[in-house]
Image: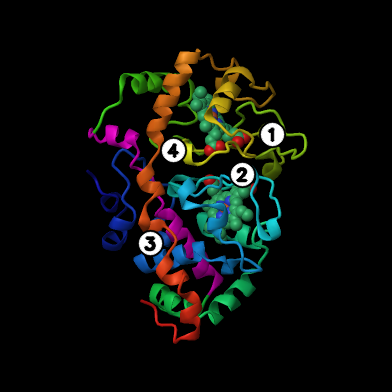
Amino acid sequence: MMCCCMVFAVACRTMSHLFSPPSYFPPPHYDFKQNPLDKDKVLLGRILFYDPILSQDNTISCASCHSPYNSFAHTDHALSHGIGDKIGTRNAPALLNLAWHERFMWDGAIHHLDMQALAPITHPLEMAESMPNVVKKLEKEALYPPLFKKAFGDSTVTGENLLKALAQFQLTLVSNQAKFDSVMRKQSHFTEQEQHGYVLFDQHCSTCHPPPLFSTYQFANNGLPLDTVLKDYGKMKITQNHADSLLFKIPTLRNWEYTAPYMHDGRFQKIQQVLQHYTKNIQKSATLSKELQNGVVLSANEKIDLIAFLLTLNDRHFVFNPAVAFPKTYLLDKKNSSSSNGEVQ
Ligand code: HEC
Ligand code: HEC
């Protein structure tokens, strides 16, 4: 198997165990040369990701909306809940395989992962903080200056390094251990039902959700009727171009079983409702994708086989990976370490 280092020739020794996608994945979009992965930066990013200190009243962390057990999505609510239980306007997407995304957010508002975290930190309905204030709080917290020193060679906390560390941690969230992957590695095989589901998938879904990432990460209108309260026109909000009306970023289908509810506004709770949408309820409009103009035809049995295939995309190793879970040793002891000399284990 070809290792990513051989392909990208960057910081080989440190990167290889932090980011080693399988050979059947395409080359990532993220330019690792400008922010080479490093284990201390990834660790710092992980701690920051789980620390509510990034929010104004220290109650909301990134993980409040992006829980590891939901493949870093959020399942309690259709729309995200931030500081003071304020309700956002969109469903928190799963975070995985982010190195392959060209744009971020459902409407593509953000072009670079290194900048993304600024959005939730400063969003009034999410963490409602300001970068200068986050920096001030982190500098006062005994835990952080030594971690910044270890990661960046300088104990001064800067917004830029904070964003880089968060991006690094998120880049390590690679899902490639679903049953689908073990079939690709020839360590397992599909059942007859899964194989039939794969054929149907290939026929009806794979132009937008192609393997092995199960998204092109481009934008499409998949025929959802406009929610008349939220009035979310997706990509058009950013480009002001009518051709982008109702186009949303195509989400990956990896780990869908952990990430309900579905779609940009979390309107569907169950995969059966998603299939009902594609087979019965596609709304025609000027920007509807041509693949969906005639709807999707699936019999009841075909739906069952398709779901059997979709189930092979769930990666429980990813969801229960201790290496990306809440960093107990750092955050549970924070109170104690703040009052001590701040030595980091
Ligand atoms: C209050 C809930 C909430 C919090 C807190 C939150 N997010 Fe999000 N996140 C969302 C929602 C909702 C979206 C989709 C936003 C949109 O499309 O406009 C999102 C989108 C993202 C995306 C883009 C994913 C994609 O596929 O395009 C990334 C990356 C991300 N968040 C990382 C973070 C990080 C890092 C933090 C902490 C600094 C964080 N989020 C905090 C709710 C939240
Ligand atoms: C023309 C492109 C296109 C085709 C074909 C397509 N989808 Fe989608 N799919 C999308 C887009 C775009 C979204 C997000 C729409 C939104 O939230 O507004 C989406 C969302 C989904 C979601 C929700 C995922 C999540 O995390 O919220 C599922 C599940 C899904 N599609 C399954 C399928 C299946 C199964 C098929 C085949 C029957 C299919 N799609 C065919 C474009 C497509």
Query: How dense is the environment of label 2, judged by Cα within 10 Å: few (below 14), some, or many (20 and up)?
Result: many
Front: mark 4 or 3: 4
> What's the distance in space between the residues labelled 4 and 1, CA to CA?
26 Å
Q: Amino acid at mark 4?
A: Arg
Image mark for residue 254: 4
> What's the distance in space between the residues labelled 2 and 3, CA to CA?
30 Å
Q: Which residue is mark 1?
A: 245
> What's the distance in space between the residues labelled 1 and 3, CA to CA?
37 Å
Is residue 48 or residue 292 the one in the foreground?
Answer: 48
Measured as percent of width and height from the top left, residue 159 is found at 55, 70
Q: Earlier in the sequence, mark 1 or mark 3?
A: 3
**Where 209 sits versus 116, above or below?**
above
Q: Which residue is mark 3?
A: 36
Measured as percent of width and height from the top left, residue 57 is found at 66, 68
Q: Earlier in the sequence, mark 4 or mark 2?
A: 2
Q: Which residue is mark 2?
A: 91
Residue at image coords 54%, 23%: 275
Task: Tell me which secondary structure the magenta stretch mostly adopts.
Answer: helix
Q: Is residue 141 visible?
A: yes
State the extent of the magenta-drawn residues as a range: 158-187
Measured as percent of width and height from the top left, residue 253 is found at 47, 35
Q: Which image quadrant is residue 304 in?
A: top left
Q: Is residue 211 visible?
A: no
Q: Earlier in the sequence, mark 2 or mark 3?
A: 3
Q: Secondary structure at mark 3?
A: loop
